[in-house]
Amino acid sequence: MKTIVLKFGGTSVGSIDRIKKVCKIIAFYKKNKNKVVVVSSAMSGVTNELVNKSKLISNNFDRAEYDALVSTGEQVSCALIAGRLKHNGFKSRSWTSWQLPILTDGPYSGARISSVGIKELNKYIKSGGIPIITGFQGINNDFRITTIGRSGSDATAIMLAKFIKADECIIYTDVDGIYTTDPREHKKAKKIKKIFYDEMLEMASLGSKVMQPTSVQDAKLNKIDIKVKSSFVFKSGTLITGSKKTFSNQIITGISSTKNDAKITIVGVKDRPGVAASIFRPLSKNLINVDMVVQNISQNGKETDLTFTVKSEDLKKTERLIKKNKSISYKKLSFDRDLSKVSIIGVGMITTPGITYRMFQALALKKINILVISTSEIKISVLISSKSVKKALAVLHKEFKLD
Ligand code: ADP
Ligand code: ASP
Ligand code: MG
């Protein structure tokens, strides 16, 4: 008898009709003599609505109350799923994070699951029950509710699979697997059968929002294989794994893109030790995430230009913080909005020369201007105008034989 964790995302449980369909999938696994544990997200749109409400109450909403608020959507969907399963004659009940408990470390809104209480859960599963567990939420040492980052139900499923020693962990979503690029952005995107954790981690971190990046990290650390499938159509999905067996020699596995990036250049800052730290210290204190950073070579040994990117919604705040930073001096600030980062990802890159040239040449032939470049062992990212993203995805998809 296998133990299987099934996770359903927001769109999969987005309406009463969808919840009824999801219950049929759960019933299928149960009838096939599996022990089934379910994790659910909130119904689609619900978490966003709660976030908006917090903003209307206060522009400085208490962080602990924020988590108590935005985690409530999951309780609704889980109760509805359990209620429907009972209606259909199954033994089922919902569980919230404090009832298990799901313990977390770290800050509100960005906590990480450290352990999951499985005693009662195991008893219940053994008695034939189907537990339905709220994704996204946990509790901390102060017995307060925490959340584990947007899209965090993925991580709840993976950590549950770890603690109950599940044989399988299946993430049900609204696409039938991981594609070479977002299938909603590029029609020629192809489904990937198997993908390494490291590649998935880069794709997720670089804008492919199909999996939460932290959850892929959890899966990698705990060696949990993940299957990604559609709850809408019955099709084989994608396996996310660390196994090196049976992989093709594809160089580039996927292409990711972001939206709403902004670029800031500080012209003529003093070129001396500690300046970059002085610039970024207040940004870090204000939880502004700085992404790509480039420092130009100093022209005269005294001054240099520093360029970096942040999310567009953080641009105004970043500008304010730089302008009021008394520990730096500079000649000019310049800003660019409506930018996107396009990245090619693949472990094959490590052993194949010439990939950077092919990427830049393909973009140049389409007259796409590159503003900033950053690389790692298995990815190359370029910052371009958001207007050119569709064209860039298409040309790179073709260049690296993903079409
Ligand atoms: P869920 O609500 O099930 O958690 P998400 O919205 O978080 O679903 O993730 C699914 C979405 O991810 C898809 O609808 C798709 O548009 C998007 N996506 C982005 N990049 C990719 C990719 N490379 N492969 C598949 N889907 C992707
Ligand atoms: N409901 C939460 C969110 O919208 C968590 C999740 O869907 O995984 O971010
Ligand atoms: Mg998701």
Image: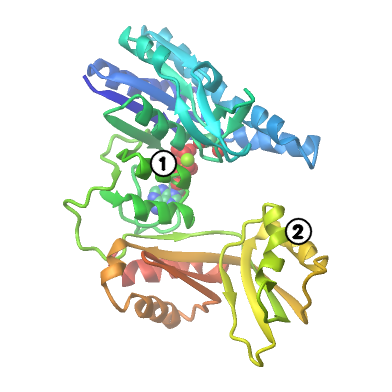
Q: Is residue 354 above or below residue 279?
A: below
User: CB atoms at circles 2 and 1 under 8 Å apart?
Assistant: no
Left or right of 62? Residue 86 is: left
Residue at 66% x, 27% y is 68
Identified by mark 1, the residue type is: Asp
Dot 1 surroundings within 10 Å: few (below 14), some, or many (20 or more)? many
163 relative to 176, above or below: above
Going from N to C along the chain, the mark reached first, 2 or 1, is: 1
What colouring style does the render use? rainbow
Residue 211, horizontal then vertical, whole percent: 43, 44
Q: Please report the residue visible at 44 percent of the width from the left and 46 percent of the height from the top.
A: 210
The residue at which mark 1 appears reads as 218
Other residues around mark 2 within 10 Å, as few (<14) / some (14–19) / many (≥20): some
- Residue 197 position within the rendered picture, expressed as x and y whole percent measured from the top left: 34, 49
Q: Is residue 347 above or below residue 184?
A: below
Residue 280 x %, y %: 68, 64
Pointer 2: what residue?
A: 317
Confirm if mark 2 falls within 8 A of ligand 2: no
Left or right: residue 200 compared with residue 133: left
In the rendered picture of this protein, how many numbered marks are placed on residues?
Answer: 2
Q: Which numbered disc covers residue 399?
A: none
Residue 82 visible in the current orientation: yes
Give the quadrant of the N terminus: top left
